[in-house]
Amino acid sequence: MFDLKKSALHKRLSYRQAKFTVIVALLLGLIFSGIQIAIDISHSRESMDDKVQQVIYLVEESAVQAAYNIDKDLAERVVKGLINHAYIHFAQIRLDDNSVLATSDTPTYDDSVMSQIMEKDRRSYAVPLVTVFEESPVGTLIVETDPEALSHDIFDRGVVILSTGFLRNVLLAVCLFFVFHTLISRPLTRLSDSLILLKKKHHADQQIPRLKGHTDDELGFLVDSFNELWNSRNQAEEALRSSEQFNRDVMNSIGDMLIICEADFCIYNANHNAFQTLGFSKEDLVGSNMRNLFSTAQLPKPLAALTSDTDLIHEVSLEGQLVSLKGHLIPVEIKARRIELNGKTYILALSRDISLRKEQEARIHHLAYFDSLTSLPNRSHFLDRMHQVQSKSLQHNMYSALLFIDLDRFKNINDSLGHDVGDKLLIVVASRLKEMMREEDTVARLGGDEFVVVLPELAEQQEPAALSAQRITNRILEVMAKPFHIDQHILHISASIGIRLFPDDDNDIKNIVKQADTALYRAKSNGKNTFHFYRPSMQLLADQHLAMERALHTALEHNEFYLHYQPQVDHNFSIIGTEALIRWQHPEQGFVPPDQFIGLTEETGLIIPIGCWVLQQACTQLAQWQEQKLCPPHFRMAVNISAKQFDHPQFLNMLSDVINRTGVDPNKLELELTESLLVKNMDATIIRMDAIRAMGIALSIDDFGTGYSSLKYLKQMPINQLKIDKSFVMDLLTDANDRAITETIIAMASHLQMDIIAEGVEDAAIMDLLVRLGCKHFQGYYFSRPVSAENCSQLLQVQKLPLGS
């Protein structure tokens, strides 16, 4: 800032005033001196003429005598007397015959500029000499003036004029400077010093002191006006300061977070509560963008609309989550408003921390929809969930199930051990039920010892849905039968369960719950620790299913399983392999088709021991055929391996052990895997496949095209063969889609350098078409049905199928 004491001398007002005063005085002095010299020159010229004429007049009579008397001496004295005059440098007396009587002059040496200028003022006088006795002149007196003498005279006087004028003007300038300094410069300097001091101290009650001697003049008016403006400014500043402090106090007194943003949502200011709640310092928060405070790192659309749609929206309300400096999420209710101030747009966002309200709402919601003891959904929540599941089941054409559970002998525990133990038991029961259910299932407590489980969208058909519900119910019964450790007590309880499938003809939720309750009490009346379907037909199916499961557990022990073998041929009708197929001869029901019990073995886990038995029997038979030399070149026996069996940790060890014990050639063994293996845990599946291929065993994908295999991984898997599912082969002659799919599978297998075999070939026309499409291996009733080992041995001896081909 400007400081008078530090400013350069040549920039000061007093210096410039003195400089301009001297310059103006000197210029005026020179001008007036020049005018005076010009006037003096004019007067000198006139004076010179007058003086020369006076001298001529004085010597004129003597010159007449000298000319009349022809007195040379007198004439010499006359002319010499004339040239002694300062302004005359030539004098001559001529007689009437024009002869020179006497002459005299002074030499001229000055060749100065002044002399040259005055040369034009040279005068020559010719005075006729006339006597009183004669009328005609007796001679002539010639006189010439000397301009050099005039120039010297003028120069001397000019020097005097200039010198005296300069001294006079300097004195005048000094006087003027003193007057100006006293009247103007010094008061202004004092005024400037007072302003600087006032600026440094900045006291509201301090003013510029009045200038002595300038109370009523312009400077006095300037001081008074400035003091009035200064007082007004101080009052305005104090009012502004008070207003700012008031606004700041009001902002900080607000219990909510107040954040003020500019139009681009850059934070302009905030109150104390905002800094405290969010944990940011003022330096960190002010200047940052408000979008960074939201958990999504994006401005909510209603808030962003305040500036994007300025003509329609001026105020919005919304809820969101802000992120504190420590990363904590703070639920807030935001009321934001756009304002215009001094031509700029600002956003005022008032954010209220609603954490407590959210907790209270969550608690109220929990009390309204969850059981206070077990934290399971209560009856209201359960009914809401039932409506949702029923709606989706109807929309997706799927069957769901409701399990109504009641603990057996719970009243005895309550009566004997007290309600505290009973409550703890209910908590553990609820925990066990939650742990064993899927994420989409719902476990609820209706009250007392009654629980319900909603199983959404089990299957599209009623029968599979009932079987799934029964399987889950059996698991619940098993879990409930395990001991409960409550305090120092070991408690044994059981449960009775009523099952109701829905939707059906009666889709009223209350009726469905009532009917499940009815099924529950039927289960209790049947001896407890069991379940009962509401529909009699479903109960019959469940009973049959349970009976079949129990029979499967003893089928292996009683040697009820046996194997049949279905030959596989090439395009020349030569046998190239067989597929081992399990059969079950039930002692009471007789022959049980595989599609009725294979799925159940998967559900119950019996597929592991049964699958091991199948592999053992198939390899034993293959070893016999090898020993009997019935196996043609490139012959392979195919054995089906389920996904659960393939994923078993001991599968590779079991496979190696069977090969070692039976002595079978692993190159003549082929494992048929289901396509479902290709859609889960690809990397582990490929590693296990590589280990099997390293043993020399071939791999085939069974029923290819019916699952969801990943072509990306198929090309990485060590697969030897793809088997086209019979669903595509049966209608190959009439269905263009089946033909296109089959042709695509054959082309893909050829491209991946895999063998291809079609199952379900039942006549020659289908085989001929498959051959034209590029398929070379076949299996189906056209060649042979599955037969016993003895019959298959006979077919191997023939080597051509169908018989008679």
Image (cartoon, rainbow, N blue to C red):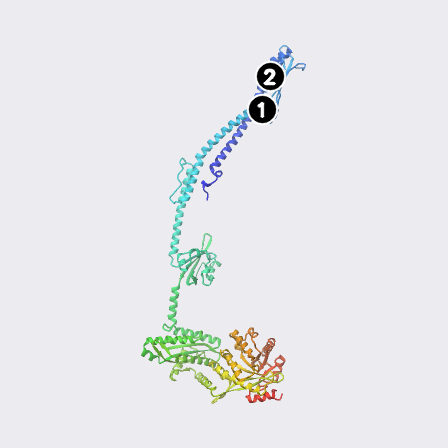
For the residues bearing labels 1 and 2, Cβ distance under 8 angstroms: no
| Residue type beneath disc 1 | Ser
**Dot label at residue 151:** 1
Residue 105's spot in the image, x, y percent?
62, 18
| SS at badge 1 | helix
Ranked by sequence position, the earlier of labels 1 and 2 is 2
Q: Nearer the viewer, residue 792 or 182?
A: 792
Q: Is residue 89 left or right of residue 269?
A: right
- 306 or 5, nearer to the observer: 5
* Image quadrant assignment for residue 116: top right
Q: Position of residue 303 (x, y in %)?
A: 46, 60
Task: Name the spot of residue 62 as percent of width and height, x first.
Answer: 60, 12
- Eyeballing the image, is 546 above or below 297? below
**Quarter of the image with the C terminus in it:** bottom right
Rendering quarter of residue 470: bottom left
User: With 511 as the anchor, is 746 left or right in this view?
Assistant: right
Task: Determine crowd level at label 1: few under 14, some 14-19, many 20+ residues with C-alpha closer than 10 A.
Answer: many
Q: Give the spatial CA distance, label 1 vs label 2.
A: 19 Å
Q: Is residue 319 visible?
A: no
Q: Residues within 10 Å of mark 2 (few under 14, many from 20)?
A: many
Closer-to-camera residue (465/119): 119
| Residue pointed to by mark 2 | 82
Q: Secondary structure at mark 2?
A: helix
